[in-house]
Image (cartoon, rainbow, N blue to C red):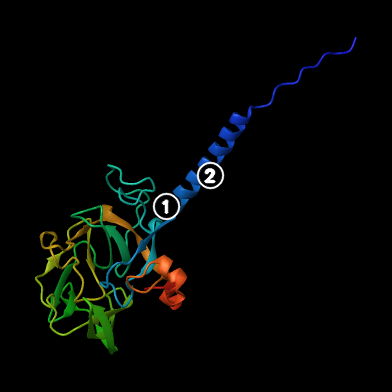
Amino acid sequence: MAEQTTTKPGPSRARRIYEEVRGLAVTAAVMLFAGTAIGQPFIVPSGSMEPTLMIGDEIAAAKYAYGYGRYSLPIGVLPVRGRILDRAPERGDIVVFALPRDPTQTYVKRLIGLPGDRIQMRGGELFINGVQVPRRAVGQVTLAEGGMRVSAMKYIETLPNGRAHDIVKVTGGMLDDTPVFTVPPGSYFMMGDNRDNSLDSRVSPDQGGVGFVPAENLIGRVDRVLFSITPFANWLQAIADPVELRVTRFFHAVN
């Protein structure tokens, strides 16, 4: 007598579709988590970091550089304290951070002062812990500010740890002379490379500035410009008219 066999029915069409959609969703979630854990893109909206970063640059904040805090965790803002896999930033880093007075806003500035440092501007010169930071003039540049063309001097400034970077400076800026700022423990002092067009840690939060930036507000370090378009253009315009693309700034390393 022949053995009787039975065929197990296969999954229904609806079940197959569900499995496929679930697989795609899981894959997308993993890719999104990995992408936001590693880095996050931002568009530079102002000229406060000229000449290093320009309006229209698209930059990536490397989140792994400093570990993760409440504003840099991949799944968004969480009520956590401190940082995970914490790594201290270095003086001279270009940092994206959540604005302390309004964490829904992100700013990008250069880290000038570490915890315990004394920072001051005297006659337009930067002093750190009572010592003038050396700078070397390299020529005149023209900046577009407020719809006007402004002539400024470009310098190479060298911080105490040997990090050198470009700054621009006009004569007689409003922030040329400041009191001494002592950076509190667990906080940092940020400045824009465009020294006369930057509301940074030299300006108190109640006056529209940044003030001191707590470590938990750090999002990531900027090492490179990904893409760049001319100021006030958008990507649709740039695709339609490639002259809006600043190709020489694509994947441009910054320091």
**Residue lying at the far right of the rendered structure:** 1
Picture coordinates of residue 125, whole percent (x, y)? 17, 80
Residue underneath mark 2: 27
Residue 135 vertical placement versus 216 (above, below):
below
Compute the Cα span from label 1 to label 2: 14 Å
Q: Quadrant of residue 75?
A: top left
Q: Secondary structure at mark 2?
A: helix
Q: Secondary structure at mark 1?
A: helix
The reply to whether residue 180 is in sight is yes
Q: Quadrant of residue 87?
A: bottom left
Name the one closer to the observer, 91 or 24. Answer: 24
Q: Quadrant of residue 243?
A: bottom left
The reply to whether residue 251 is in sight is no
Graded by Cα atoms within 10 Å as few (under 14), some (14 to 19) or many (20 or more), the crowding at tag 2 reads: few
Tell me the quadrant of the picture where the C terminus can be found: bottom left
Residue underneath mark 1: 36
Label 1 is placed on what type of residue?
Answer: Thr
Name the one closer to the observer, 197 or 70. Answer: 197
In the picture, measured across the screen, residue 3 lies left or right of residue 17, that is right
> Measuring 32% from the left and 71% from the top, which residue is drawn there?
55
Picture coordinates of residue 194, whole percent (x, y)? 24, 76
> Measuring 30% from the left and 48% from the top, which residue is drawn there?
70
In the picture, measured across the screen, residue 105 lies left or right of residue 27, that is left
